[in-house]
Amino acid sequence: MSNPSIDNLMHEERRFPPTKTFSQNAIATAGLYEEAKADRLAFWAKTSRELLHWHKPFTQTLDWSNPPFARWFADGELNVAYNCLDRHVLDGNGDRIAIHWEGEPGDSRSISYAELTAEVKQAANLLTGLGIVAGDTVAIYLPNVPEAAVAMLAVARIGAIHSVVFGGFSAESLRSRIDDAGAKLVITADGGWRKGKVSALKPVVDEALALEKDFPHSVRNVLVLRRGENDVDWVDGRDLWWHEQLEGVSFEHEAVAFEAEHPLFLLYTSGTTGKPKGILHSSGGYLTQVAFTHKNVFDLHPETDVYWCTADVGWITGHSYSIYGPLANGATSVIYEGTPDSPHPGRWWEIIQKYGVSLFYTAPTAIRSFMKLGREIPDAFDLSSIRVLGSVGEPINPEAWIWYRDVIGAGTAPIVDTWWQTETGAMMVAALPGVTILKPGSAQVPLPGISIDVLDEAGHPVPPGGGGFLVVTEPWPAMLRGIWGDPERFVDTYWSKFADVPGGPKYFAGDGARLDEDKDIWLLGRVDDVMNVSGHRLSTAEIESALVSHPIVAEAAVVGAADETTGQAIVAFVILRADQADKHTPVEASALLRAHVAGEIGAIARPKRVVVVAELPKTRSGKIMRRLLQDVAEGRAIGDTTTLSDASVMQLISDGLTPPAS
Ligand code: PRX
């Protein structure tokens, strides 16, 4: 796995040790590594007991008798919402702000732990009143508003399972997720604010539930939050206003404990096939690891810090680091509804200034787009409260890293580059800001208690300087417990590539990585057919299947092409049906198909370019050679074509390129 750009990166010589003052006051010390190394399971048991309240203490830490199905803290019982709420109030911190919420139009709300606890208790009573019981699934399709946190925590409080669907997904994407999870209730809003206007949500839910005439969906009610004030249609008997339903509902609710392995949530993510996977997370192990990593990686001092994770609650980062991690730790967090540039390009920095944000967590794509706009925009705001900066979702290139530190972090804030996935539930590879000497571009080291390796194709660990596949070699508390309804796919996807290696099966993450001479980890991106666009995962197969569902398309192949801002950009190559080819110019077809994919999956999946071609490069056995299409999409010389069934195809494709769509 040679990769010249990574070889260059690995020669990055800049090093940033923590300052003495930072280290002296740091929450995490080097002792954590020693402790975890001496006895990993004892370390996690102690961490869990320290960070969480167990209604019934556990006596077993890990049951790995049936790999890859792990059970953590299995004989213990806890309530996740109680851990995020009630106990902070009982500890005397009820007046501390849990959430500073900033709406896009400029409205805002600061909600204390006491208030949030009361709201969640009331919502829990409402859910019970609607017939939701432990083990039921509830779909949540909301903007980034405090009620999303209230809904998630209320569902968790009564032992039901939430499945949050990002508000940018289409009706079809929502329908398939509701269907797969068998959701009984959908919690949505009329609409939410994005880019200066209301983006409707309720009509998408209506469409999802009506998509197939006889679709025997499981949804009994749709609970609708009023946010956008946009007009909505109403299905009597099914649709209920959130504010009306809450009237008169009690604020008293006693949290009962559930087993540590009780399911907490499903979150759908793209895999290598067209069908998204419902990643299943459970309670005790998940909460332990999100709390531990949030506290130690961000150096959280909950009494004084103000923390902001910019991710939408619809993604795993929003789940683990906007909701569960910060609330479990009694932190004060900011939640922002809208886009970074509404109504002006300095909105994020204005929010940091307004709330005195000290710990800030975002994605490299955002950092790169701010870099392009120029430092005058952030420089106009007081960002002096910033202490720690985090990065997530994709590799951060050293230029963006340095800009982030210099411009947002005043040249002093440590940057923690955190590698993890929807499946891992919580951070796995990241620096500890008071301990690690930082290297721009590298996620660096496994967290204490986490065992990571880089293996070659044969399953042997690569030596320093080598590259291969990133694996997790030991079970970890927040690991996914499976794929909803599909245990076989769980085993095949993650555990079959390195099933027969010494020490038992290894979790294959789907990422390539290299180790440098210090054994620091450099992520190389996905090695499968999964793209990473702006830190979001999309599968080539999913987009291809959306493309071929359009009547003018005969065949489609999708690749992720390197993109300066978004990491990768979606480029689609399509062959039109013979009877359609003369009816549409390539430019028209491209516009039509880009809109079609956005409608089928959601705007995040809209290809940057759709290139109409006469042929696709295929091997003699008929497999599309994406590698060659990637060469074309990235404007490189086309690689080895010897296995192509017809080598002239590549010339035809290069000749047929249309100019990029805007
Ligand atoms: O390829 C890796 C990349 O994002 C993938 C996980 O995507 P998702 O499940 O959507 O979760 C994103 C937020 C945790 C990984 O397989 N990735 C995530 N973080 C990093 C990263 N690549 C490089 N460096 C990171 N810090």
Image: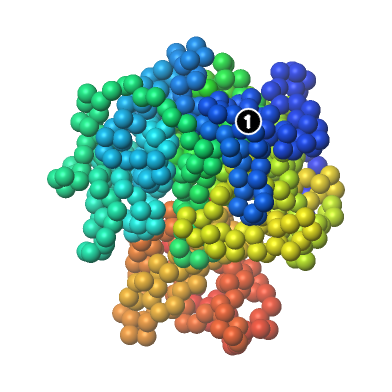
Q: Quadrant of the C terminus?
A: bottom left
Instruction: Please state the horizontal and vertical placement of residue 423, each as a whole percent of the image.
Output: 57, 49
Instruction: Please state the horizontal and vertical placement of residue 232, each as a whole percent of the image.
Output: 19, 44
Front one among 602 and 161? 161
Specify whether residue 557 is in view.
yes
Front one among 216 and 308? 216
Residue at the location (61% across, 37% down)? Answer: 73
Residue at the location (20% across, 31% down)? Answer: 244
Front one among 38 and 144? 38
Instruction: Please state the horizontal and vertical placement of residue 614, each as a whole percent of the image.
Output: 47, 82
In this image, 283 relative to 202: left or right?
Answer: right
Which residue has dot 1 on it? 48
Front one among 375 and 539? 539
In this image, 279 relative to 475: left or right?
Answer: left
Residue at the location (59% across, 68% down)? Answer: 630
* 76 versus 485 height, above or below: above
Which secondary structure, mark 1? Answer: helix
In this image, 27 relative to 35: left or right?
Answer: left
Residue at the location (28% across, 57% down)? Answer: 217
- Label total for image: 1
Whether disc 1's CB lies below 8 Å from ligand 1 is answered no
In this image, 387 relative to 224: left or right?
Answer: right
Instruction: Please state the horizontal and vertical placement of residue 576, each as a whole percent of the image.
Output: 39, 79
Q: How is the image coloured?
A: rainbow
Specify whether residue 311 is in view.
no
* 168 versus 258 height, above or below: below
Q: Quadrant of the N terminus?
A: bottom right
Residue neighbourhood size for the residue with mark 1, other residues' Cα within 10 Å, grouped as few (<14), some (14–19), many (≥20): many
At label 1, the amino acid type is Ser
* 638 versus 72 height, above or below: below
